[in-house]
Amino acid sequence: MIDGRQHYAWDLPDLHEERLDGYRKLRDDLRDRVAHLIDTVVPPPPPSSHAAFDADLDDLQAILSDMGRQVLDVSRRIGPALASFDEDELGRIIDADEPIDHANSLIDHRTLELIALRQPVAVDLRVILAMRQTALHLERIADGVVDIATTAKRNPQAIKSSASPKLGTMASSVVTMTETAMEALTARSVDHAKEVERQDDDLDELYDSLFAELLTECLNGEHLETVLTLDRVARALKRAGEHALDIAEQAVFIATGEIVELGRF
């Protein structure tokens, strides 16, 4: 008795009286049986390290893309919520921050795991690092939107009294910048990144114009708390745009390997 988990016994013909053709026929039969046995009992080889890395990278990209969609969703909703002062919607925007934070933490864990286990080099490492930085900036855009919603709920009269359409225009600009920055990252496009830089200049002009309005209102005796509240909202939108610009910089980093500062001077 032969010890083992599985036993295979083949009845083979006695070829003592056979000619050479009989032995060849048996040879071919054994070859087919052995090949089938190997396919049956031997597990498939593990994927190559590069194939496994590509799969992990695709998974990371999917998480980042979903995070981007969530951030864009809350960014699109904040302008209309302010314009109509929809307190319930402002609350929902605040609540939407938790899954975004979770996605950021998951990407943080996955990128560290990829670097530690796969030891990527050159462009692969650039992609991983850029994804990590992008998740961080997306999370901060969402934090800015949540801060705006929280500020609005705490100071409803200030938001309701605002007659300036510039806050809504700034909010729309942040959405456009974030969309373009994510497109730049996906396409690894320097041209898209430069478009974000141009959009950031427009956002800065909007902020400067709104700040001048607020300063005039303050000098004309407008309630100081209202002015400060509106300025806080405007500054949060301006910072969100700067984080979109930071994402565009990551696209340039992937495409060229260069660390650039767009729109800084």
Image: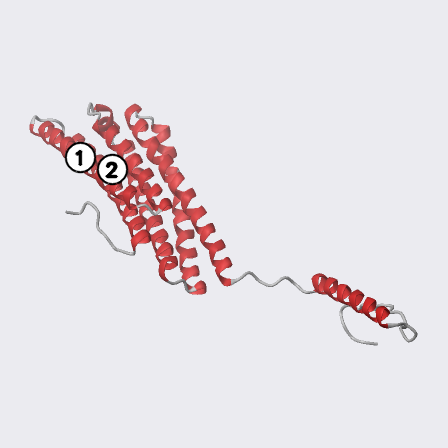
Q: How is the image coloured?
A: secondary structure
What residue lies at 29% left-to-right and 50% top-to-bottom?
252
Residue at disc 2, secondary structure: helix
Q: Are marks 2 and 1 in contact (CB under 8 Å)?
A: yes
Q: Amino acid at mark 2?
A: Leu
Labelled disc at residue 195 = none
Q: Do we see residue 240 in this rendering?
A: yes
In the rendered image, residue 15, in percent from the top left (x then y), is placed at: 89, 73
| Whether residue 17 is situated above or below residue 115 in the rendered picture | below
Q: Amino acid at mark 1?
A: Tyr
- In the picture, the quarter occupied by the N terminus is bottom right
Residue at (21%, 39%) from the top-left corner?
198
Where disc 1 sits, the SS reads helix
Residue underneath mark 1 = 207
Expressed as whole percent of the image width and height from the top left, the position of residue 9 reads 83, 69
**Circle 1 residues within 10 Å: few <14, some 14–19, many ≥20:** many
* Mark count: 2
Instruction: Please name whichever residue, 13 or 119, is drawn nearer the observer in this view of the structure.
Output: 13
Q: Kindly tell me whether residue 224 is visible in this rendering.
A: no
Whole-percent x, y for residue 40 in the image: 72, 61
Task: Determine which residue is flagged by label 2.
Answer: 237
Query: As drawn, is 89 to the left or to the right of 237?
Result: right
12 to 129, vertically: above or below: below
Q: Nearer the viewer, residue 48 or 3?
A: 48
Q: CA distance from mark 2 to mark 1?
A: 9 Å
Q: Earlier in the sequence, mark 2 or mark 1?
A: 1
